[in-house]
Amino acid sequence: MIRYALKRLWLGAIIISVAMMMMFAMVYLIPGDPASVALGPRATPEMMEALRVRMGLDQPVWRQFLHFYGSVLRGDLGTEVLSDRPVLDVVMEQLPFTLALVVGGITWSVALGIPLGCIAAVRRGGFVDQVIGVLSVAMIAVPSFVVAIYSLLVFAVALQWLPAIGAGEPGDLASRLQHLILPSLAVGLGWIGYISRMVRASMLETLEASHIRTARAFGLTEHRIVYTYALRIAVLPTITLLGVGIGHMLSSSVFAEIVFARPGIGKLVYEAISVRNYPIVSGAVLVTTVFFVLVNVAADILVGILDPRVRSSFN
Amino acid sequence: MIWRTLRRIMREPLGAIGLTLVTVVVLSAVFASLLTSYAPSKISPAQRFASPSLLHLLGTDHLGRDLLTRVLYGGRVALLIALGATAVSLVVGVVLGLIAGYGPRWLDNVLLLIFDAVKSFPTVMLALTLVTLFGPSLYAVVLVVMLVNVPGYARIIRTQTLVLKSAEHVMAARSMGATAGRILRVHILPNIIGPILILISMDIPVVVAIEAGMSFLGLGVRPPTPSWGAILNDGFANIRDSYWIVIAGGLPIVLTTLGFTFFGETLRDLFDPRLKGRS
């Protein structure tokens, strides 16, 4: 088990460093000198030179590259030029809002996806199964930004049941949750579909297993078999799926944050781009990527612990 | 052959809905100029924010442009980008997949690592970074689509190539002295076209969503080119007073993604159930 976990972690570390390499290449390739971009058109040559030295732009590429790696490993993502604050602080300030959105999306998708998948598996081949199947595909297909805008239009603008803008009053949990309902639905809707399909498929497979046959032979009710004995196993693949899902939800949260005018990483990057604030863009993208890779590694290791078959197939 | 396939698809309820939607979307994009008498970018200040009526079936936007016209012409943009970007990523994906599957072991490992690394970027973050670099344009959209799709295509092609590599007919060709290029072209490529076609029909909705999403954020095709995402963006700014603009922009996206997904799912279930695990 430890060998499997180490192997998976090592792969994660490689992926992160390749991602860092690409980030560095991007920042390096940006047309125009970062120093002149930062200082604006009215900067004097002396000011430019001073900032170039401070940013290390006078060094050869490979020195800059090593320096970039070193400082990222120390948790230093550079300084934001406008406010002179560390990039990491600015990004970390926004991260909780985005995480709340993703957790909300997971809540929606698990709370609705697992029951739908179970019902479809129990009624396999029937009308209910077909309806759930079509619904699941539809939820997967429709892009999250359309869901965000339409749900804003229906529930916030037309019916006025839920708030349209912002993340709620700080410190007021009820208001925060109320502001979370619609954006997190937009983020999680597609994954309701993915999870219900996954649970249906693995439930059908589990129901064929011999211990379920034994349970049937003992005369347990179908309800008890499905929800007590089979679900425990059928739900395992959902964990890996959610590992992938979190990455997609991070993507959708950009749209949800913009549509619902919520603070968060997506909105931060989007606004940084329009004012060409590159350190924020690369810092936020890097933090998101590292987070995504770590979640996937954690999901894989968790599945490895729960399901020994995965471990052996990895070797 | 094609007719038999279509008839089999029409027999499935999901396939019938999908094929109908796809046909409607494609035909309305192709014959856009016949279906409307307005020009897509003609500004008429007197007609600003007109709600849907017989004159303007879907209403007009903040510049008085007829929304139905923009939706129809936007379909051309969406489908052309979807086909073009998918074709480009397919070519790159097939070449890389063949190299990874047929080439030396170390190259295979390096390529797999790169695929994994590219996939480990959340899509929208990738798009935002690329636009920072190159500025918003059609090419940025195509580039994002490529980076999103190529790793997936290449992986599937690689797996199929690995399987075929040790198949008897390929062994026979190799023992008769066929070059690697000939083996790939004559013996391997024709055998992987089926799964590729199914993948394409499943990926078109994803590409349509990427184009519309980027245009919605103002990072895709430039105005005044009609794009469904751009209509959504125009409508979003006026969502409280002129709700019909977002409806006009979102509906074609919903119908197109649903249509192609239903169609692709049916195609896959009928012809290649093995691909089912890939989601």
Image (tube, rainbow, N blue to C red):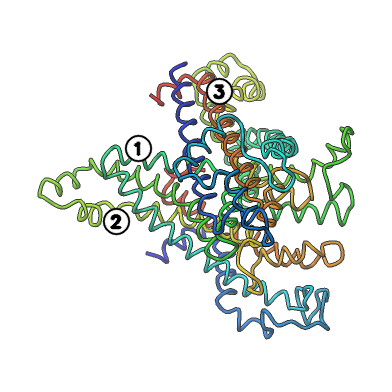
Query: Element type at marker 1?
Result: helix
Both marks 3 and 2 on one chain: no
Number of the label disc, if any, that sits on residue B179: none
Residue B139 vertical position relative to residue B73 in the rendered view, above or below:
above
Q: Is residue A161 above or below residue B25?
A: above
Marking on residue A302 = 3
The residue lying furthest to the front in this view is A46
Cβ atoms under marks 1 and 3 closer than 8 Å: no
Is residue A118 visible in the rendered image? The answer is: yes
Task: Look at label 3 and name its amino acid.
Answer: Leu
- List the residue tagged with mark 1: B109
Query: Looking at the picture, does residue A134 appear above or below residue B44?
Result: above
Name the front one of labels 1 and 2.
1
- Callout 1, which amino acid? Asn
Query: How far apart are labels 3 and 2 at the CA level?
Result: 40 Å
Check disc 2 and report the residue beneath it.
B190
* Picture quadrant where residue B196 is located: bottom left
Disc nearest the viewer among 3 and 2 = 3
Spatial distance from mark 1 to mark 2, Cα to Cα? 25 Å
Q: Amino acid at mark 2?
A: Pro
* Residue visible at 34% across and 45% down in the picture: B158
Estimate the x, y position of residue A67 in percent, counting from the top left: 51, 37
Q: Are marks 1 and 2 on the same chain?
A: yes
Chain designation of label 2 = B
Measure the C-alpha gap from mark 1 to mark 3.
Answer: 25 Å
Asked whether the residues under marks 1 and 3 belong to the same chain, the reply is no
Q: Is residue B157 above or below residue A75?
A: below
| The C terminus of chain A: image quadrant | top left
Q: Which SS class for mark 3?
A: helix
Residue visible at 77% across and 61% down in the picture: B236
